[in-house]
Image (cartoon, grey):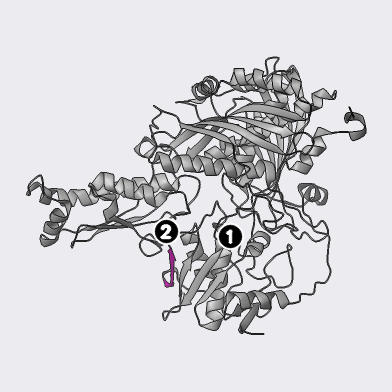
Amino acid sequence: MNGFVQIITGKDFPSDVNNTYLYPNDITQPLLAVDHVEFAGQPLAIVVAETNSQAKAIAQAVKVTYKNEKTPLLTVKDAIQANSFFSIDNPVTETGNVEEALNKTKNMVSGELHLGYQYHFYMETQIARAEPTEEGGFKLDIATQMQKDVQDAIAFAFNTSSNKIELTTKRIGGAYGGKATNSIIVGCAAALASHCTRRPVCFHGDLKTCMTAFGTRTPFSIYYTVGYDDDGILEAIDCKLYTNSGPTDFDGEINDTSLLPCFGDSAYFCSNRRFKNFMCKTNIPSTTWCRSPGSLQLTGFADQIVEHVAKQLGKDPISVKRANLYKDGQVSFDGRTIKDCNLTRIHDKLMEGSNIQQRQMEIDEFNKNNIWKKRGLAVTPMRYRLDNSWGRFAVLISICAGDGTVIVSHGGIESGQGIHTKVAQVLSYELGVPVNDIMVQRTTSVTSPNSTATGGSITSEVTCKTVLECCKILKSRIEPVRAKMDETARWRDVIERCYREDVDLQASYLWIPPANETLYNSYGCTASEIELDVLTGEFVINQVDIIFDCGISLNPSVDIGQVEGAFVMGLGFWLTEEYILDKNTGRLLNDGTWDYNVPTSKDIPVRWNIELLKNSPNPVGILRSKASGEPPMCMSISVLNALKRAVEASRRDRGMDEFFQMPMPATVEKIHTVLKIQPLKDFKLL
């Protein structure tokens, strides 16, 4: 076929290359399948052609024959029936004495919650360009959140040293965790093709490839029993948590021993809490980190528990949630004493500022007067635990003697979160250089080696702190020269004299966050109001009010943008984004935008009010700030709760007032299912 160069399969894999990409965590996972296929969409071969379109056409013409086909394990229920589990480090996570508390509690309720997939849906799909070097290594320009891991994996695969693998990343067109470990596959594939052809090779995965070959957010299934008193105060929570992880446990959230204790409680105190944890081995692409990984599911679960308790008691969920909010001095699930807690303050401020009680009465009146239109309002608080201690992002700052302009390169990856903007602001603030004279250069493995992965909402903060400390090194060299000059001397004149006096105008720094001194909580509260068309299942988000604790924001415009983006991405998870798999093969049936529905302009709130909490400095934060990338996503479940209030109002009209669990995602079809409309009984001709 036109443009064909080479095809590389697992069978004819070069003998001098290791067929793996997950070094050092799981070297049994092949880059290209050889004798056994774990899931539909698993990479089998690499087609190299002169152009991208020619490579796609050739790949589509390849015919694959399978033998000894077996029914795939696709769901948690499949894994339970087949007893297909990974061994994990923390099979039980517990605080207090759950058994004793459940035996003593006056009220008890049980239920289950099933949370599905979510594709990352970055604007720019996976891409890497690899070029062989004369030293026997590679230069890669790659969209990745984790340069060090890609570097290590390629070095291992090609039995060479890491110093022969040079990586460069300018920006990555969005990521949300999808360009963390998933990008290692892309980097290794591009390097392999370049190795085999001895030519520069660019790998650019289209949307279909990215949705079928690479992992998504991890589906969770949780079975729970809750004990509580007559006021709805939580006394004991006992859960079984199953995660659908695919064929490898590399990115399994519950294998991270800190994740469950950090997020399993969210905003709600309970002294007796237990999770029994199971990681299911199944035949789907290996799931991976996705914005608010695990934390989105767990904070949503904590919220739904309180919703269930409130329904059983016939109480307003808003009041029951407030009664269970953490207060200073209480001990959280991860064993840390809560302090500087803003939850009650934010909750009450939102209730008053958004006129919640008046709006509830207006909604009740609207629902009484309308059969086929219903409104609902919900308030959802959130606590999100953050820890900067694992972040390591090397910084290199160079001052140009000719005109005093500054070049900075850092280990954080710009993925749309505004890290370059914040870095330039902090550098300008500390050195006194105009922002326009600062150039933030691309991240490279040469200037910022050994940096940790960009993620966890901490990268901007830690990088800014590192820039701050690096600037202090330069200031200590510049100040003695500045002291000899007139106070009105221009920056460029000071730098020119420093150059003449042989002052080193370049500095590098790696800040090591002190252990246990960088832990803090981010807080927020959201009120959401929706209007549901009972006949069609469609709804409009009339209004959303958010108060978010961002400490002293480094850049309010950037942070409000992060709140907006995180919240909308959360709407997709709870309401619209559904993976549909072929039950016989596991093939993804909706591998494009026509059938996989991310939120669009018509899905966002009609009225949207966002406020960053004032007078809330973070005592352990970088310049007293707090993270904004992931926590707001966990407040988006308030829209699902508001939708449930509207469905409840409609069901009550038809004599149904028992508890039900909203399906997730709550698509139009699923809303129809829980509405339980019976046309012959409910429709009347007048």
- Is residue 166 magenta-colored? yes
Q: Which residue is more in the foreground, 109 or 1?
A: 1
Residue named by callout 2: 450
Please state, as top left, top right, bottom left or bottom right, where the N terminus lies in the image: bottom right
Residue 587 image label: none
Name which of mark 1 and mark 2 comes first in the sequence.
1
- Say what secondary structure mark 2 lies in: loop
Secondary structure mainly formed by the magenta segment: strand
Q: Which residue is more in the foreground, 668 or 465?
A: 668
Q: Residue at x 66, y 17 (%)?
A: 361
Give the residue furthest to the top: 230
Q: What residue type is disc 1 on?
A: Asn
User: In x, y percent, where is residue 61?
Assistant: 72, 77
Q: From this viewpoint, is residue 376 visible?
A: yes
Q: What residue type is disc 2 on?
A: Asn
- Say what secondary structure mark 1 lies in: helix
Q: How far apart are marks 1 and 2 (CA)?
A: 19 Å
User: In x, y percent, where is residue 122?
Assistant: 56, 55
Q: Is residue 32 above or below residue 103?
A: below
Q: Mark 2: few, some, or many residues within 10 Å (few <14, many ≥20)?
A: some
Residues shaded magenta: 164-169
| 52 with respect to 246 (left or right) | left
Q: Mark 1: few, some, or many residues within 10 Å (few <14, many ≥20)?
A: many
Residue 182 image label: 1
Q: Residue at x 43, y 78 (%)?
A: 133
